[in-house]
């Protein structure tokens, strides 16, 4: 099949609308198999920069539409959409028009243009065909790039930074579009659909079979109910936290964050001997039915027992930030006066977080977690507010806090640090 790859490379150098090549059914499948292997290799290679960008927090895949479909749709409906309907629709839009004879929109334009100019329709098509063949590389690559960039919508809200790095984000779709476009011209439209469907099935199978969360603690008794699940590697979703006097529920939360809640400590003051353990993601649900029981102590006890951990402490001189009120009138505008009381809610996007019915402790926690700074405050924690906090942009953060009548002031202080040590082997 080496000759097939050579022909594919030559086609990409100079795309032309070649005649469909007659071949046996077996040859069709052999060529599709060889190109699918190349497709898988390219997807793996082109995914590396995307993973690096995600680690650098340039963007977040937590809102990716594919994972939302995997987690939210029944398997039959997911396969119907992802493997049949979406590939067919995309092929009709982006690959069917790669042949002049099937580019019905262009043929309609030529027809209207010829009528308006009083020219013969056949002559109009002949003239259009010459232009089409002369500039076919722009046709082919134009449809391919359009196909790739349609997939930017999978990332949800797209920031300016994401548009700047978009060539990396859509590179896998660009490569797939080149391969499918070649198949469409060489083997025909139907075989392009078959390849596209197979491509989608292969890459949907990874999250389908991997995004299975594993319960590690599940206890129900009269005093409390607690469930701790380890999140699968391919599961994507928004971190969320809901708390109340007797309820604690968090999703897609790191172990560092869960332990910081249980210990009532800043996540930055918690260090792990094993950093991989710190980043392990969890779903936790705890409902306390006995008011004499401490919610934090129950959570801490089960986390330490199940993962066989212990906590050591030490002190270090560290820069911290003091959160103060700069304008009490502006802060009062954020109060939830007259609004229905409810639990604290957090709603994340790649660029900001909405805090609903939040106290100052929650605002402090968000600032510490997403800006990796230590925050202290003497602002009373009794009132509830609504805040919209930008993420990963300190200049914008300071402006937003100022609009709320708040400010951050840096000072040096000696802080206690906790080290999480594995106390046994699991």
Image: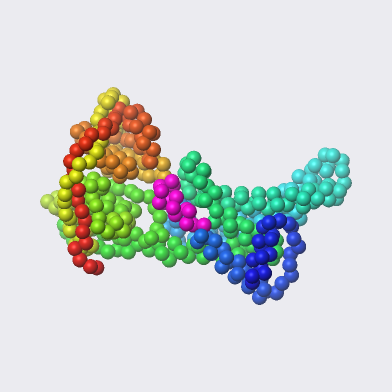
In the image shown, does 242 or 178 lie closer to the viewer? Answer: 178
Quadrant of the image for the N terminus?
bottom right
Residue 421 shows in this picture: yes
Outermost residue toward the left?
292
Identify the residue shown where x is 64% and y is 66%. 5
**Taking 51 as reference, is 414 left or right?**
left
Identify the residue shown where x is 25% and y is 36%. 321
Identify the residue shown where x is 60% and y is 69%. 34
Q: Residue 134, position in %: x, y?
A: 77, 50
Judge whether residue 56 is colored magenta: yes
Judge whether residue 14 is colored magenta: no
In the image shown, does 252 or 339 lie closer to the viewer? Answer: 252
**Taking 353 as reference, is 413 left or right?**
left
Q: Residue 117, position in %: x, y?
A: 84, 39
In the image shown, does 210 or 294 lie closer to the viewer? Answer: 210
Q: Residue 367, position in %: x, y?
A: 30, 40
How many labels were placed on the picture? 0
Quadrant location of residue 221? bottom left
Quadrant location of residue 331? top left
**Taking 26 as reference, is 197 left or right?**
left
Q: Is residue 179 above or below residue 270?
A: below
Segment tinted magenta in the rendering:
46-62
Q: Residue 406, position in %: x, y?
A: 29, 30
Quadrant of the image for the C terminus?
bottom left
Identify the residue shown where x is 67% and y is 57%. 12
Residue 247 shows in this picture: no
């Amino acid at each position: 099949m080496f000759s097939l790859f050579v022909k594919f490379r030559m086609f990409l150098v100079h795309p032309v609308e070649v005649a469909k090549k007659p071949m046996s059914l077996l040859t069709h499948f052999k060529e599709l198999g060889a190109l699918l292997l190349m497709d898988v290799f390219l997807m793996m290679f082109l995914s590396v920069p995307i993973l690096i960008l995600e680690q650098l927090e340039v963007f977040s895949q937590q809102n990716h539409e594919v994972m939302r479909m995997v987690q939210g749709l029944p398997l039959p409906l997911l396969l119907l959409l992802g493997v049949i309907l979406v590939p067919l629709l995309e092929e009709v839009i982006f690959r069917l028009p790669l042949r002049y004879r099937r580019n019905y929109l262009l043929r309609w334009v030529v027809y209207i243009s010829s009528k308006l100019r009083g020219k013969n329709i056949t002559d109009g098509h002949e003239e259009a065909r010459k232009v089409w063949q002369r500039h076919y590389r722009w046709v082919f690559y134009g449809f391919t790039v359009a196909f790739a960039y349609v997939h930017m919508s999978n990332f949800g809200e797209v920031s300016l930074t994401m548009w700047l790095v978009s060539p990396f984000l859509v590179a896998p779709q660009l490569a797939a579009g080149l391969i499918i476009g070649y198949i469409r011209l060489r083997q025909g439209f139907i075989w392009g659909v078959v390849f596209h469907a197979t491509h989608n099935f292969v890459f949907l199978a990874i999250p389908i079979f991997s995004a299975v969360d594993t319960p590690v603690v599940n206890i129900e008794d009269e005093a409390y109910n607690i469930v701790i699940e380890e999140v699968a590697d391919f599961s994507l979703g928004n971190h969320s936290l809901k708390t109340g006097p007797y309820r604690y529920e968090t999703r897609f939360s790191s172990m560092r964050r869960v332990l910081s809640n249980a210990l009532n400590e800043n996540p930055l003051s918690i260090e792990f001997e094993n950093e991989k353990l710190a980043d392990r993601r969890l779903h936790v649900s705890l409902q306390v039915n006995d008011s004499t029981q401490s919610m934090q102590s129950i959570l801490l006890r089960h986390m330490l027992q199940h993962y066989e951990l212990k906590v050591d402490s030490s002190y270090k001189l560290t820069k911290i930030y003091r959160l103060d009120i700069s304008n009490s009138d502006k802060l009062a505008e954020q109060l939830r006066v007259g609004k229905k009381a409810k639990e604290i809610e957090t709603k994340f996007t790649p660029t900001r977080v909405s805090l609903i019915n939040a106290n100052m402790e929650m605002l402090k926690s968000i600032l510490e977690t997403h800006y990796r700074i230590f925050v202290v405050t003497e602002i009373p924690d009794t009132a509830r507010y609504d805040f919209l906090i930008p993420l990963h942009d300190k200049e914008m953060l300071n402006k937003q806090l100022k609009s709320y009548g708040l400010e951050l002031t840096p000072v040096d202080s000696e802080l206690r640090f906790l080290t999480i040590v594995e106390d046994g082997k699991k």
